[in-house]
Amino acid sequence: MKITVAQIEVIPNDPQANTAKIISIVNQAEKDGADLVTFPEMCIPGYLIGDNWERSTFIQECVDCVNDIVEYSIGLNVAIVIGSVSFDEDKNGEDGRIRKFNCAYLIRDGKVLQKRIKTLQPNYRIFDDNRHFCDLRKKHAIVDERYIGTLDYPVSEVAGKKIGLLICEDGWDDDYSTVFGDFRPVLKFEKTPDLIVNISCSPYTNGKNNKRNRTFCSGSYDSNAHILYVNNVGCQNNGKNVMVFDGGSTMYSPFFGEAYSLYSPFQEASQTFDFDFEEELPDVPGEDGMPVLYQAVKYGVQKFMQQTGITKVVIGASGGIDSCLVAAIISQVVRPTDMWLVNMPSKYNSGTTIDIAKKLAEKIGCKYSSIPIEESVELTRRQFGDGLSEFALQNVQARDRSSRILAACTSVFETEGWNGRAAFTCNGNKSELTVGYCTIMGDLAGFLAPIADLWKTQVYEMARYFNENVKDIIPKEVFDIVPSAELSVTHNVDEGKGDPIIYAYHDKLFASWVERWNRAIPEDILMWKFEMRLEDELGLDFEIGTIFDSEQAFIDDLERWWNLYSGFSVAKRVVAPPLVTVSRRSFGFDMRESQLKPYYSKGYAKYKALLLCRDKM
Amino acid sequence: MKITVAQIEVIPNDPQANTAKIISIVNQAEKDGADLVTFPEMCIPGYLIGDNWERSTFIQECVDCVNDIVEYSIGLNVAIVIGSVSFDEDKNGEDGRIRKFNCAYLIRDGKVLQKRIKTLQPNYRIFDDNRHFCDLRKKHAIVDERYIGTLDYPVSEVAGKKIGLLICEDGWDDDYSTVFGDFRPVLKFEKTPDLIVNISCSPYTNGKNNKRNRTFCSGSYDSNAHILYVNNVGCQNNGKNVMVFDGGSTMYSPFFGEAYSLYSPFQEASQTFDFDFEEELPDVPGEDGMPVLYQAVKYGVQKFMQQTGITKVVIGASGGIDSCLVAAIISQVVRPTDMWLVNMPSKYNSGTTIDIAKKLAEKIGCKYSSIPIEESVELTRRQFGDGLSEFALQNVQARDRSSRILAACTSVFETEGWNGRAAFTCNGNKSELTVGYCTIMGDLAGFLAPIADLWKTQVYEMARYFNENVKDIIPKEVFDIVPSAELSVTHNVDEGKGDPIIYAYHDKLFASWVERWNRAIPEDILMWKFEMRLEDELGLDFEIGTIFDSEQAFIDDLERWWNLYSGFSVAKRVVAPPLVTVSRRSFGFDMRESQLKPYYSKGYAKYKALLLCRDKM
């Protein structure tokens, strides 16, 4: 069977552009003699378009686009699978607006052979499916195994093969059940299909590729059908989270659990494959790990800039590892002439870091400036007299750099050379963002935070990866100095004085609060400490006793960071720029947060008392 | 029947504090000889706590708190209605975590007489109920009228009366249906109750009080039962939206649709009422309109400051209406000694506005400073040479004011007098926020935007209301000048040169994009214009032709603002501070937005062509 797998870039909110692209690929597939051409989920409207789903005129236009494709298919041999939104004229959704569905269509020769409504809808992380769409279970007023017979899972013949359709989460059925047991759409078809086409709009997450291969291989094995997973590329955002889509379209076979990855990640492609459902597939499960993680970040930056029309980038280059990595990534996205590295020294900045920043710009071959902040900081100090504490003056420096200098640089850069739109980056990482180790209107500002979903330890790893595998431009010295904000005499890198965060430990601690599936709270941490299994639970490769010489010191440290994480840092994240999401849980609209007082459970007090007793022994 | 209606302030994320308060009120109710004491929905955990629902240790603690109350009730006569989270040990939720429910409990003498799971869960606006909780329909695998008999809606006898429980949205059943018709929990009880207690956590919205009275009156009439609506006060937030809860606890009678509002809005109270279910109730439907709208804004500011520990406020006082109103509101929340009005003149600021700012501070009796920005702007101009355009220099001024001066003021203010935490306000309004007529790190910055959910026309109304009904402190002159940013010679208020937004028209236009239930897009606007019904649809009290002298001018204006609204201004809103939400649709997580290219439907081009033909006639 000849199938054109259209792993396209979907432009969110632009049904006309997407439909034009779909029709052109259908045309090519027909010329190639394909029996079937498949597109991703929601390939007409896009998926992450916020609450624009409420606009009924937009919904009608998406329906019209489906009809255009149906009309275009008249007289063609190739059958077409697309995804779009549909609506029910008679019924309202539970928000009182028109009732909408996330649908897959199988179209051939002017007819809709199948219209399949999504059965399982994700409502965790960034996903708001139930907010917008009525799922098949709700539509049929059925989530009950006894009535499952009436749910409509037909198969259709295409080129002599039985084809069934599923949509994304329908294939991720691990956590769905009825009162009578598991609920698995892959097993619900009226006849066993030869091929289940799963159209998806599934964002990249570090490590998710392996998980998908396990889940879909067992879906294929259990259903005794081949599964073709078709996912889009491109980037879509929810305001706060820039989600990248890696494609990763894959054919799964029911025989020995082979996963045949069809394309490289993040590649727009629409090749025609000749599949023999009787033969073994090559087992090519697709890549994961640092190479793909790096690609994901770079791709997110590149696509987000395309979408927002930003073509020139200003980077505050402190000479630290974060801005070095951001500059390295940006150097792979724009031409050197469209990059401007700006070092903004105060009296606290060392020659060491200034040299690193300068060397980096030289290696990239981009514009470099040193614009000092001393005069402005002095003016502010003068205007406010002794009222500004040493700590307040640290923030004054950070704000002067971003909101005065970098912002002005973008204005200047826009008028230079050709007329592009310029913006400056936020170079913060996830460790800082977790506890708010950053200044609002200072280093927290920017149009995008490319590496704010990477822990500091990952930032170092990616920087090393970059030098070894992409281009050797990040100066070696930056790997040897301590990470430091250089905002006061207590931050002297040449004296080895740096950040208060002990990244080897705190990155793992913070991850247990943020990324762990059952997110830990201080009670859990103290319980693990008390039960001598903290190292195992956090995945530390050293004894925690090598960092803290008493339980009191351990607890003080825990409370310090917990109070920041669940206190003031939330306010900082609320006004943080969008970030490229690559982890299983990122800040923004992925992990929704309220500004609250830090919470300590009753059990926390118990474990604290137990641990402090140990200090006295 | 004697009922203590506990309209309490619930502290989100603090089950221990809430439980202590509940037990103390139960104790008082018992002393008062009450038969029943009722608390609001989720009165133990709070409601808007973001994704903290994922922490299983927290959930267990909330369950323990319910058990504490059950234990406390042993030997008491008073029956207790509370709301909290519960979980199912055997089943996972569809996110793979423990399955949780939003529950109401009826407790008496150490026993749980009823545990009622919420049937209808809202998933629009700020509500994410399905993200966190399994509703009764899903739990019983039933959304089908045929199986409704097995859904458990018991009634219990208390003081000889039959009591049924519902939770918030269960009473707002307008938009819920099954395949067989309407689905109305008020009609599902096993026997007709004498009293349905609806415990709620329902945020204030301008105009919602009237809607609730209509909905609950007809619920009471149709079910032939009294309904007691018990709602909390306080403020809870989702990061972006500070939601205020007005209480508004009300008894509804089934006879003639009386609504007997028990307390003033935003008042924490727990009085004991003696209800005779045979007698007519006084018809006191509770207030709405500007007095309550003003209270809502003030209350939101006050409570949010309490929650975040901010006690001193710095306000950039330009002498315009927005900062005047914000200062007036703040003057009702903190002592004059904890307020600091800062005027930051450049060469573009008129004596007129400077005088207004100064006069305002005098009337409030608070600290006032004039801190000029000229020297700093000059320094920036000097550092960047001619690279900064006139437009760029406008933004330089705005950023200098907020990120240099106001931020430094808060640092200084914190160290003065007593040790409180200081912050500065964002004085922007909804009209500006809609189209991004503001500067990031400039006037868009602040810890909270008190009036960012009020259109400019509402800002004027509230300012007038304040002077007439609260305190006459806003200088009269501000009502006479044109609204202006005063950032260039083109903004001269003394010459009547002001903002490009024509508020009388644009406020209504923008509201049709943001607040209208079926949100309008440009195609709708042009269709209305073409069909000569734009004035009716937008609610204008003037002819649109008085503003635009051609269709071309009308369309250019529409496209200008639409491009801003659906383009760059989204990026601004992503980094905007939290705002006090008072309208039916506010920016933030109430209206979720992606950064996208502005969208024009196919139909737009058609109407545009039709309209432009008129210009040629």
Image (tube, coloured by chain):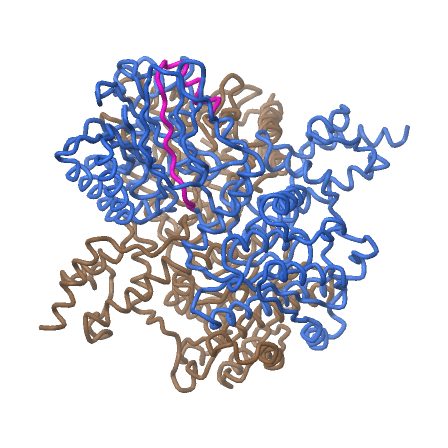
Chain colours: A blue, B brown
Instruction: Locate residue B340, reporting x and y percent.
Output: 62, 70
Towards the viewer: A383 or B138: A383
* Residue A27 visible to the viewer: yes
Q: Quadrant of residue B124?
A: top left
| Screen quadrant of the C terminus of chain A | top right
Residue furthest to the right in view is A617
The residue lying toward the viewer, choosing from A262 and B434, is A262
**Image check: B191 left or right of B296?**
left
**In the image, which residues are magenta?**
A213-236
Whether residue A137 is visible to the viewer of this picture, yes or no, is no
Is residue A405 shown above or below A502? below
The residue positioned 48% from the left and 64% from the top of the image is A422
Residue A94: image quadrant is top left
Vertical placement of residue A331 versus B373, above or below = above
B92 and B340: which is toward the camera: B92
In the image, taking residue B542 as reference, residue A508 lies left or right, namely right
Residue ranking furthest to the left:
B617
Depth check: give the residue in front, B16 or B517: B517
For residue A119, above or below residue B250: above
In the picture, measured across the screen, residue B503 lies left or right of residue A239, that is left
- Residue A351 in the image: state x and y as whole percent: 76, 63
Residue at the (55%, 44%) spot, across then down: A587
Q: Count the labels in the image.
A: 0
The picture places residue B77, in percent across and down from the top left corner, at 55, 24
Residue A453 image offset from top left, x and y in percent: 57, 44
Q: Is residue A85 magenta?
A: no
The reply to whether the magenta stretch includes residue A227 is yes
Q: Quadrant of the N terminus of chain A?
A: top left
